[in-house]
Amino acid sequence: MSDLLSSKKTVRLTEKILYGGLGKFADSLNDGPSFISADLYDNRYFYAGNEKFRKNPSKNAHWSLGYSIVDLTPYDFEDKDYYLGGYLTPDNGFNNRIQKVIDKMQCRIIALDDNSGNGVSFFGTIDCIGTGNADIRIIRRRFADLMKYTHPDVKIASVNVFSTHAHSCVDTQGLWTDTISTLLHNKKKNKKGKGTYLSGADSEFMYTLCTKVAEGMLKAYESMKPGTMTLAVKDIGTDYFNNKNRKSATSLVTKITRLKFTPDDNSVTPTIIASMGAHPDVAGLPTSDKEGSGRDLCGEYIYYMGEIINKAGYNFMFFNGAICAIYMSCGASNDGVNFTRRYERSIRFGKELGRITLALTKSLDEIKADPLLYNEDEFENDAKVSALNNCEYTLWCKDWTPVKETSVKPVLNIRLKEVRISVTNPLIQIVGKLNLVSYKVIRENDGTYSIVTEIGFMEIGKNLSVVMVPGEFCADLLTGGASLKADGAFNGVDFPYPPLTEIFGRELTAFGLANDAVGYIVPDNDYVLGEFGNHYHELIGLGNNAGSTIIKAFIELKEELGV
């Protein structure tokens, strides 16, 4: 007990020093160019969604879906420096400059409508570490202009942009792009109070990205076709993902959720929409091999998951889940299979996830009859390699149990709500003042700072209820867990609100990094800035009340909707 108290005292002292030192440095800086006073905030291009939720399909309702995919890979990476979003560590010499392109950085987009008159909703998921709300507003503005010019009578219910959180694509936030040089340059400008700041993320690349995503949304709308929707959900267990580096957070969502859209016209490609809680951080880590620097652009295992699904004859759309502290395990059949390059492991893991997603409703006999799902030569080779490494090998579909697929009635309800979160983390204040990230920071009348972000709640039929959260959400806040209770939290008090599943009184799927990327969102009662072993997440988060602010906003949203 005395050791625990001593440890906590050390952590508190570290936290006090951090708040003191970083706080003084933050206070010494002038507000950056993206800071605005509270009365100047403008919420144009925020889409609130549907005013009222329907309980049943409207007369003549039917699903319509359109799909597009946009290639965001920089064509000039050999002539210009681009940087990966993630892994700025001693392992890679604090240098994230891309050396090679392995596959593609993409944005997958769907346009979805239940034809009730509530309007079309648009969803785009970008292969990247995260997309800030300011850039998402730019995408919305450009898309709104395109629609106004080409389809002025179309009612738009919502425009939503997500991130896969891939750590091996071009940095879209600015925290990993030639960081030291940018900080030093901007600090000089900040001290003088004048001059042009450098942006953290590459401004030309972000301009192109925003334009391409907006154009992709238009293409998705113009490709919309009527069809039917089905849902399948399977718990794949703990072989694939674990909660490895936040011991106090005990919840782990291990389900794959799959929506399948089948167009009425069989000449049109069907679409699979998949969601799971994943942390695509495999390819970018360096290896001991001198060629394995990890500085390779790679869409991570989400890309290869999609590749398998594409080969099966489907478009692929992906939404990430509640991913705070959630990371890849080897997978049921990855044990003992070694790879020279990290991205090779990502390829293999993605293929396996793609096969699982395709096979959710198939029997083992059906799986074995499909050469895309069951490649006997590949499995035999992997088993041999595993045996040479004195490891056991388990085929991914061993003891497989299929799940049932249910029809989804054409009801699409979506509502979004703006939320103002205080920025109490001095490190994030410094990042904002030195203009590394693309956010509009609100200067409140009392001198404090906040960021306006968004939450959302969506119903797809009565089969699937979705909460949309703007960062890396701790799963304990979604389904409950030890860190919400006093005896499991660092600060020794209870979290003031129940988890979202209790608040809404139903099973929920989380779509994370939704319409923003505000970093980690953890329970206030388990927030501590001075313990980096199990609480490094607090370093990359807005502050000590982000968790309660988000949950309170969901409570208000539920009351407004009456659901």
Image (tube, grey):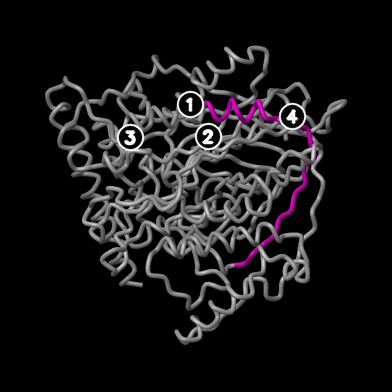
Q: Position of residue 453 (x, y in %)?
A: 47, 31
Q: Is residue 548 visible?
A: no
Q: Does residue 36 sit above or below 272 in this rendering?
A: above
Q: Does residue 469 sit above or below 438 in this rendering?
A: below
Q: Residue at x 43, y 44 (%)?
A: 128
- Residue at numbered disc 1: 139
- Residue type beneath disc 2: Val
Q: Position of residue 328 (x, y in %)?
A: 49, 63
Tell me: 483 left or right of 352.
left
Specify few, some or many for label 2: CA neighbours under 10 Å numbering under 14, 14-19, or 20 or more.
many
Q: Position of residue 367 (x, y in %)?
A: 73, 67
Looking at this view, is 460 or 400 the one in front?
400
Quarter holding residue 452? top left
Q: Is residue 277 magenta?
A: no
- Residue type beneath disc 4: Phe
Specify few, some or many for label 1: CA neighbours under 10 Å numbering under 14, 14-19, or 20 or more.
many
- Residue at numbered disc 4: 53
The answer to whether mark 3 and mark 1 are in CB contact below 8 A is no
Label 2 and label 3: CA atoms lie apart by 17 Å
Mark 3 falls on what kind of element?
loop
- Residue at numbered disc 2: 161
Mark 2 falls on what kind of element?
strand
Q: Which residues are magenta?
A: 215-237
Specify few, some or many for label 3: CA neighbours under 10 Å numbering under 14, 14-19, or 20 or more.
many
Q: Mark 3 or 4 closer to N-term?
A: 4
Quadrant in which the C terminus appears: top right
